[in-house]
Structure formats: structure tokens, C-alpha cells
Image (tube, helix red, strand yellow):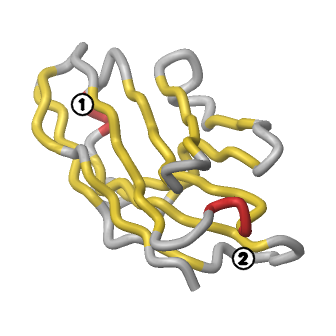
Amino acid sequence: QVQLVESGGGLVQAGGSLRLSCAASGSILTYYRMGWFRQGPGNERELVAATTVGGDTNYADSVKGRCTISRDNAKNTVYLQMNNLKPEDTAIYYCAAKMFRSSTWNSWGQGTQVTVSS
């Protein structure tokens, strides 16, 4: 399975921006879907955004209009651009990959912390 390494998290003030990166050890073209999840304090892990190998994207309602997921297949990297951050965006953000015809997400990164101060 591909190894995923996230980076780009940090502490930012409300209204600020961050770009998260997810570097894969192998080709992300072998995975049907790449996604970003997050888990805030006391919350369950939730899908933030995902993109398919064909370029389709979907977003959680809570981040629509503020976040953009993109992928650079040549660099085997997936990005999550987050703008107008809010304190409720504070969470550990995880990158994940789902193989073709898989019902579950197959590979996970170790996570990167995003903290938004008010």
C-alpha cells in the first residue's frame, strides 16, 4: 500500500489560510479516490474533501466555498487549500487513499494538526 505523509499544518488566526500537502510514496493514479479527513476534539473523523482519478471533487458542507482539493499526479501529491479558516476547523487532518472497487479507505497518513485561534 502507498505511504502517505501530510504536511502544512500549523497555528493560524481565524480568517487565515493554510495549504496542506499529502505526498504519496507511489503513484496516486493507482487509487480511485484521494481524500482529506479531519478529527476535532471530541468529534468523529469526517470527510472534508475528496477527488477522484478523473478529477471529480466533493466537499463537506461545512467547508464548501472555503476549501479546494487538488492533485498533482506527476508529483504524487494531493493538496487541500483552506481559506477563511474558523476555530471550528481545528482538528487533525488526515490524508487517505481508496483503491478501485474498494468499499473502504485503504491507506492513511499520520495526520497534521491544524489549530485556528479566534
Q: Quadrant of residue 90?
A: top left
Residue 112 location in percent, x, y?
26, 57
Residue 45 location in percent, x, y?
48, 62
Residue in the picture at 55% in, 42% down = 72
Q: Given the current orientation, which residue lies at the most extreme bottom position? A: 1
Q: Is residue 93 left or right of residue 30?
A: left
Does residue 85 lie above or below 72 as drawn?
A: above
Q: Amino acid at mark 1?
A: Pro
Tell how many labels.
Answer: 2
Name the element at disc 2. Answer: loop
Read off the residue under disc 2.
104
For the residue carrying disc 2, how many other residues have a C-alpha within 10 Å: few (<14), some (14-19), or many (20+)? few
Q: Is residue 29 left or right of residue 85?
A: right
Residue in the picture at 29% in, 50% down = 91
Does residue 14 lie above or below 48 as drawn?
A: above
Q: Is residue 91 left or right of residue 60?
A: left
Residue 9 location in percent, x, y?
22, 45
Which quarter of the image is occupied by the C terminus? top left
Residue 117 location in percent, x, y?
11, 29
Read off the residue under disc 1.
87
Q: Earlier in the sequence, mark 2 or mark 1?
A: 1
